[in-house]
Amino acid sequence: MEAGTRAALPIVPPANERASLIRRAKLLAWLGLGWHAIEATVALVAGLAAGSIALIGFGADSMIEALAGSILIWRFASARAASHGAEHRAQKLISATFYALALYVGVEAVRTLAEGHHPDVSYVGIGLSAFTLVTMPVLAGAKRRVGQRLSSPATESEARQTTLCAYLSAALLIGLGANAVAGWWWADPVTALVICGVAVREGRRAWHGESCCTAAITLTAHDDDCC
């Protein structure tokens, strides 16, 4: 193997460090899962009350992010912690959650624009998006660092889900704020389309991430499911 190729290979952490990193990844996933459950409930209730597709889409994204966190917890269960196949399946499942979000939000945003639906002002949604915009980058950064040290594409994909939540919070804050301040009703479905586009991009990145066999060098056990 050439020196340049060897330099590109990720470093395998020692077994005790890997176990600690897995515990940290699961803890961060559980923290995200708990917050996204609250976030989804508030966003969906407020979105339905205001007739805001952007806020409903944000709530749907929170549910999908909770699902992504659940997938990651499943991936690092003791029976699968060293499984190449589990890493690969988790990566693909997380990617699929992005596409599910994009499909729902895209269809609803286009329908809202076509019908000219005017959503009500949602100060609850504005407060929720502002809080999420501040907190999610911190959680995403912690997840990303753990994923990089584990050389786990699934963990890094789940971190991108959390980063996406921060992006969407900014877009949602702008859209809801424009509707509240200037009465720009169309800012709400346009914000939803932004959410849709970002979700498609991140889904593509997750789907075409590091393959199962490439990631296999970071794991300590063989798994017949790989490739």
Image: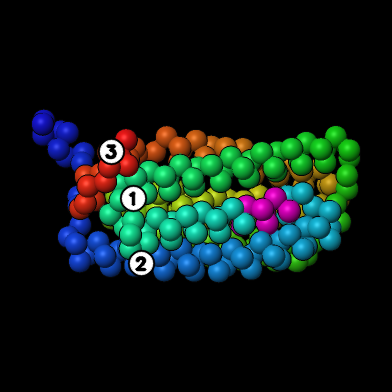
Closer to the chain start, of discs 1 and 2, is 2
Q: Residue furthest top?
A: 2
| Residue 1, numbered circle | none
Residue 165: x and y, percent?
57, 54
Instruction: Give the distance between the C-alpha atoms of the residues marked 2 and 3, in whole angstroms.
Output: 24 Å
The answer to whether residue 59 is magenta is yes
Magenta span covers which residues? 56-62
Q: Is residue 184 left or right of residue 20?
A: right
Closer to the chain start, of discs 2 and 3, is 2
- Residue position for label 2: 24
Amino acid carrying mark 3 in the image: Cys
Quadrant of the image containing the C terminus: top left
- Residue position for label 1: 152
The residue drawn where x is 33% and y is 63% is 78
Depth check: give the residue in front, 155 or 137: 155
Instruction: Give the distance between the C-alpha atoms of the residues marked 3 and 1, in whole angstroms.
Output: 12 Å
Do callouts 3 and 1 mark residues in contact (Cβ within 8 Å)? no
User: How many residues crowd around disc 3 within 10 Å: few (fewer than 14), some, or many (20 or more)?
Assistant: some
Q: Quadrant of residue 129?
A: bottom right
Q: Which secondary structure lies at badge 2? A: helix
Closer to the chain start, of discs 3 and 1, is 1
The residue drawn where x is 50% and y is 59% is 70
The residue drawn where x is 34% and y is 67% is 23
Above or below residue 48? Residue 113 is above
- Residue position for label 3: 213
Q: Which marked residue is nearer to the observer: mark 3 or mark 1?
A: 3
The residue drawn where x is 36% and y is 48% is 87
